Image (cartoon, rainbow, N blue to C red):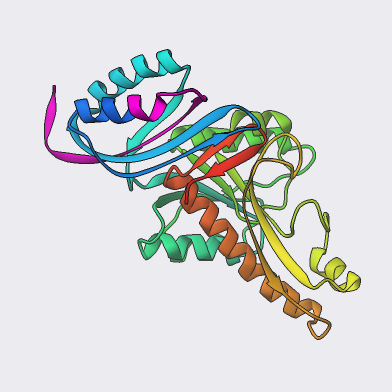
Amino acid sequence: MLVTDSPTPWVLTLSCPDRPGIVHAVAGLLAEHGGNITESQQFGDPDTGLFFMRVQVESAAGRPELESALTELGERFAMTWHLDVAGRAVRTLVMGSTAAHCLNDLAFRQRSESLPIEIVAVVSNHTVLADLAAFYGIDFHHVPVTAATKADAEARLLELVRVLDVELVVLARYMQVLSDDLCRELEGRIINIHHSFLPSFKGARPYAQAHDRGVKLIGATAHYVTADLDEGPIIEQDVERVDHTHSVEALVALGQDVERRALARAVRWHAEHRILLDGHRTVVFR
């Protein structure tokens, strides 16, 4: 067995058709490679017949050796798996328009070292967020979008994703609808925050709509982006209770706080490899 000088903290996620012996096989493989399991979670979905597992393990074995062994195991169990160094900062590109609260929250959490991401760029169809990006020392890219330039703007985005080796794209209140082709290109690695429990109060001025209807709860939904607008797999939802005394402005302020919280948790769980796709749903190992 090829070993390094000291154990590396790895995180392994996997999914496969459920059957007896999966946990035993995974644990045995890791033990054979000097692995000490420090955290393990699993879930068998009776609706889809799929099994999901997340394991954190310390092992002095090198990546090539572990990946070779996992490839063999994956073939045996028809398994989809992913191996990464636990705690590694995920290279992230944040997109926004004019609202600053979600970008500011993510950048602050990154700076305070509480969020395992590295924001390598901010992309916006406006220039309002340029000063905020500069404050945090993040490169800002102004990519205007019109009906005539939409295809070119998305091509520019994909070029930045490629050049900057971006692993995760976060739509932090980016007020543009992405094309089906772009959604498919970034499937499973693009997260959006929506200003309600989907699909309520879609479109413009959601908090004014909520105020007009006299809602008692306001919420936010963080989800993966798919070609089906605002219908991608839901990662996290959060709420605040309100009443008739709240003005539209008060709802906006509360709503922005809910959006920040839900998005930060979704980004954290993605970066920590705690989310596995289960069809149009997610399994989140918290």
Residue 1 % position (x, y): 13, 22
Where 27 sits versus 252, above or below?
above
Residue 261 % position (x, y): 56, 64
Q: Nearer the viewer, residue 235 or 79?
A: 79
Residue 24 inside the magenta-drawn segment? yes
Where 156 sits versus 247, above or below?
above
* Residue placed furthest toward the right: 212
Q: Nearer the viewer, residue 165 or 56?
A: 56
Question: Where are the magenta residues, as a range?
Answer: 1-25
Number of dots carrying numbers: 0
Q: Is residue 43 visible?
A: yes
Q: Nearer the viewer, residue 166 or 26?
A: 26
Q: Is residue 188 visible?
A: no
The quadrant holding residue 67 is top left
Residue drawn at (43%, 63%), measured in percent from left and top?
109
Residue 114 inside the magenta-drawn segment? no
User: Is residue 201 shown left or right of residue 269?
Assistant: right
Residue drawn at (16%, 40%), measured in percent from left and top?
7
User: Is residue 149 shown left or right of residue 192?
Assistant: right
Residue drawn at (38%, 30%), measured in percent from left and top?
23
User: Is residue 103 shown left or right of residue 22?
Assistant: right
Residue drawn at (85%, 73%), measured in percent from left and top?
211
Residue 207 % position (x, y): 80, 68
* Residue placed furthest toward the front: 20
- Main SS of the magenta part reads strand
Residue 2 % position (x, y): 13, 23
